[in-house]
Amino acid sequence: MGTKQNVLGLVFASIHDEAVYDLTKLRTMGSVPFGGRYRLIDFPLSNFVNSGLAQVGVITKRNYGSLLEHLGSGREWDLARKKGGLHLLPPYSHTSSNMYHGRLDALGNVWSFVEHSSAEYVILADCDIVTNIDLRPAIEAHIESGADITAVYAKGYYDQLTGAAATIFGIGGDGFVNDVMIDPPMTGSCNLGLDMYIMSKDFLRRIVKESMSRNRTSLRKDILLDRGASYRILAYEHTGYYSRIDSLASYFAANLDLLDTEKRTALFTKNAPIFTKTQDNAPVRFGQESHIKNSLIADGCVIEGKVENCVLFRGVRIGKGSVVRDSVITQDTVIGARCSIRNVITDKNVAIADERQLTGSAGYPLFIGKGAQI
Amino acid sequence: MYIKKEVVAMLLAGGQGSRLYALTKDMAKPAVPFGGKYRLIDFPLSNCTNSGIDTVGVLTQYQPLVLNDYIGNGQPWDLDKMNGGVHVLPPYESNSGASWYEGTANAIYQNISFIERYDPEYVVVLGGDHIYKMDYAKMVDYHKKMKADLTIAVIDVPRSEATRMGIMICDEEMRVRDFEEKPAEPKSTLASMGIYVFTWSKLRKYLIENEQANTGSKDFGKDIIPAMLANGERLFAYTFEGYWKDVGTLDSLWDANMDLLAPAMPLDLYDKDWRIYSRHNNRPPQYIGETAEIENAMITEGSVINGRVDFSVIFGGVTIEEGAVVRYSIVMPGSVIKKGAVVEYAIVGEDCVIGENAHIGASPEVYHEMNREWSIAVTGHRITVSAGQAVLPKQILSESI
């Protein structure tokens, strides 16, 4: 255990952008705000760092302005390093790199970076899974088993009507994958892939080069699904809490999940903190007529009204006499006086004037876009 | 090679802060927590960085561990600079022997070589025990405009308070003509804030002379300022208007925290153009539970509140359990207030555990009715108060009970 100097972590910051289109219109999946003070990329990055990885690459596609601003030099994740550290890998960053479609051609684009890293192993992760996972046992299981690929999965429930782009594994008694399905027409309990994969650099080089020569772009479809039988794929179970953001409704639910103390304490632990960019906000100021129940509140908020079952991000203001329930209110949203708000998601910098009433429904929250004035 | 700096700031952070008793038992006064997520030193350090002063020497001596750790490389205040930045300057041993900092002037004297590296025109001398927001650059401009040798920041105080402070007697162009320490009959109400701008060549001369004279005090107020006045140097007062609060005593520390809860608080911590920076702990947002009742409070990251909080400042990572009541109090980072405990008119230090149904402090009304002398109750850092125990007003607990 300890540090994993020989492992390179790669985060795909843009790969599920279409899943929560409203939130990714202006940003990558990785920079979607989450949990009061985080962005989704904070989870895979913190998991890498807490698992001892010292070299990390972030692969982006488009709209990555907010992501670059968030990550900066990587200092907040302790990744501003002379040796290794954080590397941002946008398209067209190398002479041979182009716009990509799947994980394999994205990896082909940045292969010179991967090749030149000192790592023997590579871990891939996306930004749609919110979890706190120690990857060290998974890396060790991968090495010990001699597998070609180790895929991290969790036992979960898949609903063909609401679930999007899920990878489902059949697992044999030996712990190896014996069946792979993507978006199967089924509903029920299954082994859901978390799109975290561990491979040796040598193996990854082979499949990336072979795939590029045959114009195959998708790791899941072209390798796991079509050629899964020719490789030894170890299934590694993650038993801790996780949530998958694959729709606006699941984004809403995953945020409100944090009001559950068991889930919240599983995600935010003392010894494996989730790191993020700090903003130097003052503490939350609760006014004389404030009334707060069951809510997660980030610093910089000033609350004069009533708040129940909400996640409030940094710098939110709620005026006197307003009642905000069952909502996710992101950064710097200003809600005036005597408003009534329920089942709403506001994006950054939304301003809601006095006496407005906004209501969505529990399964389908009302979304208010960035900077809207209501 | 060092690049010349026009201004270097020297922050006197070595004081014991003995009037904070248990709270400074194992940390220097500038490291004492304040206002939910700050420590006292955040105010002068943030003022420096917001004023464009990027070279700061922090003079430490008493219990420096927490303070050194907290300052680190200065990054939270943007003071991790290639040239300049924040430097912690403890006393050291030289070939002429080792000595502690004997007084405020001696502390600067011993660090003349640090200041000389930057060849500054002006040196700003600051303390680490006041809460205020101030643009030092404006004071330096004033110092230049008045062609002063020393500019002293002053604040107009009520006459009753002037008897407890250093008072400047000025002429109509604000030139300081006389100076009185804690006068019984104050001739003016302009109190020194302990913030000085010196022309470095002058300060250097007076520091060396003071050292040679060996007065025993080696202090700015007792030696340097009187000597400069006696020699007819140009001393000017710079009037500061705004919130400024000494937090050198337990009562004033409690008061200053309570000030943050006043509806018309003149110290705006939410001003994005003049942020007060602090070192962060990567704590998640605070969680306010189903059974919580919160009114008029300041609460910060990592806290979990299930009890009742009224008119209080709650720091990071504090747990207040269901049925516990915290009113008119300050609860410092990491402390736990157990079920049924009552904390009122009190300061609870860092990482304390207040046991079930324990009672800390009492309201002044109750004590005044009983004709008993009242003051806030205090528990030091890392203190456990066992279930059902009481800490009375005026009591300062430095051991667990």
Image (tube, coloured by chain):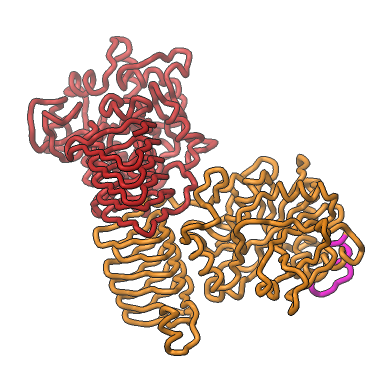
| Chain drawn orange in the picture | B
Closer-to-camera residue (A117/A339): A339
Q: Colour of chain A?
A: red
Closer-to-camera residue (A169/B216): B216
Looking at the rendered structure, the number of numbered marks drawn on it comes to 0
Tell me which segment is drawn in magenta. Answer: B206-218
**Residue A351 location, quadrant:** top left
Residue A114: percent from left, percent from top: 42, 25
Residue B205: percent from left, percent from top: 88, 58
**Residue A340 location, quadrant:** top left
Q: Is residue B1 visible to the viewer in this orientation of the structure? A: no
Q: Is residue A304 visible to the viewer in this orientation of the structure? A: yes
Closer-to-camera residue (B74/B357): B357
- Residue drawn at x 47%, y 88% is B372
In the rendered image, the quadrant that contains the C terminus of chain A is: top left
Q: Is A92 part of what is drawn in magenta?
A: no
From this viewpoint, which residue is outermost toward the bottom?
Answer: B371
Residue B218: percent from left, percent from top: 80, 69
**Residue B343 location, quadrant:** bottom left
Horizontal side, residue A141 vs residue B245: left or right? left
Residue B321: percent from left, percent from top: 30, 66
